Amino acid sequence: MSFQITLKAGRERSVLNRHPWIFSSAIAQSSRTPPDGAVVEVLSSGGDWLARGTWSGNSQIQIRLWSWREDEPIDGEFIRQRIARALDGRTALANDPATTAYRLVFSESDGIPGLIADRYGDYIVVQLLTVGAALRAQSIVEALVDLLQPRGIYERSDADVRAKEGLEPEARLLWGEAPDGPIEILENGQRYLIDFISGHKTGAYLDQRTNRRRVAAYCRDAEVLSCFSYTGGFELQAAAAGARQLTAIDSSADALAIAAQNFERNGLVVPVEQVEGNVFSELRRFRAENRSFDVIILDPPKFVQNRSQLDRATRGYKDINLLAMQLLRPNGILATFSCSGLVSIDLFQKVVFGAAVDAKREVQILERLAQAPDHPVLLTFPEAEYLKGLICRVV
Ligand code: SAH
């Protein structure tokens, strides 16, 4: 017997509009309380069938919707078809020999709530972020093996969001073999060492791939400062594009060590100054030392995890943007990003505006950037859009 969930009157609109989340506050009653991850049938207050999803008893987002077709069961074949459809959307990347790491499946945006799958060369790294996805790990693995024949599938479900679903962090080999250390992948023709077993996220920040290339286009003959460098993502592209001198700041010595290896691997002879430290204080030190740059990249980690942190985070964004503007030479380029989903594009632009006013610099927006196209945003699910960036000319 399936589980039937009836919505409160007036709460059907978002389901009819194919938004994939149902909050607990929208639920009037359930036939029986479903076990975590179970398939549930969602009914209107009048009893009409609306959609099918999976139950997350611990989460405020109590139901994730997977299908709006009554004749479509959520089974192994469904998962296989959805993954195949996601891969169809990435054929240009699959056929590009210069890039071997990218996102294969992006959760709700690809119709599988809670499943992230990233390709790193011959390996696949998955995150199972909802209990509905976690329970279906086996079908997911079978489909990925069948469709892509990887050497191994590794799970990096150690993101904090798992806790909201009542799930423990998990990092393990799911299928095949794991590499015994970092592996090499290609991005826009540059070689990067990726340690997907112990690196950040699933190993790299794939969402910035297209932006690294865009920013590199401004780096020819430039003295470039990359803040929040991690393993040198932006710098390698900038160096390949002809940067004259690179400075990279990151608080992680391990990340900087991998970045140094990446430079060597690519035979880049550009002088690189690595600074292990806090961007907020290092930029102040640079200002006190009267240093200046032609291009400054700000790619901070997510400052905002929930609404209560929004004020503090906006002050943080303003601070680094203001400092960067003060360090830029006339006609300098500021490439500034925010990956906090709760910071809208409008708010982010306002923050950069505030920084420009305080810095007393005239600032033009040259380009607006977003997450790479292998992280698509479904029109019915705008929450999937989280990464935003501006390339500005600081006159
Ligand atoms: N630009 C990178 C990704 C940056 S991820 C790329 O393209 O791959 C964010 C990085 O910021 C992490 O490496 C983390 O170690 C670093 N970090 C976080 N807070 C920091 C701080 N206050 N000062 C310096 N580095 C910081």
Image (cartoon, helix red, strand yellow):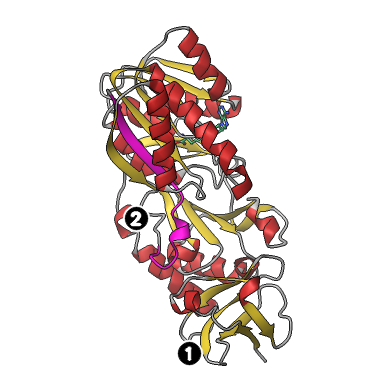
Q: Which residue is drawn at 57% across and 84% down?
A: 9
Report the number of numbered marks. 2
Q: Which residue is drawn at 45% across and 64% down?
A: 381
State the residue position of label 2: 94
- Report the span colored magenta: 378-394
Q: Position of residue 98 (x, y in %)?
A: 32, 43
Is 343 one of the magenta-colored residues?
no
Contact, mark 1 vs mark 2 (Cβ under 8 Å): no
Q: Position of residue 254 (x, y in %)?
A: 59, 28
- Report, in whole angstroms, how far the alpha carbon at label 1 lies from the one at label 2: 32 Å
Residue 228 visible in image: no
Which quadrant of the rendered structure holds the C terminus? top left
Residue 366 visible in image: yes
What kind of residue is marked 2?
Ala
Q: Quick one: which residue is furthest to the top in this view?
A: 289
Placement of 276 over or under 45, stated as above or below: above
Q: Where is residue 183 in the image (x, y as percent from the top left)?
A: 50, 40
State the residue position of label 1: 71
Left-right relation of 2 to 69: right
Is 387 one of the magenta-colored residues?
yes
Mark 1 crowd level (few <14, some 14–19, many ≥20, 10 Å Cα) = few
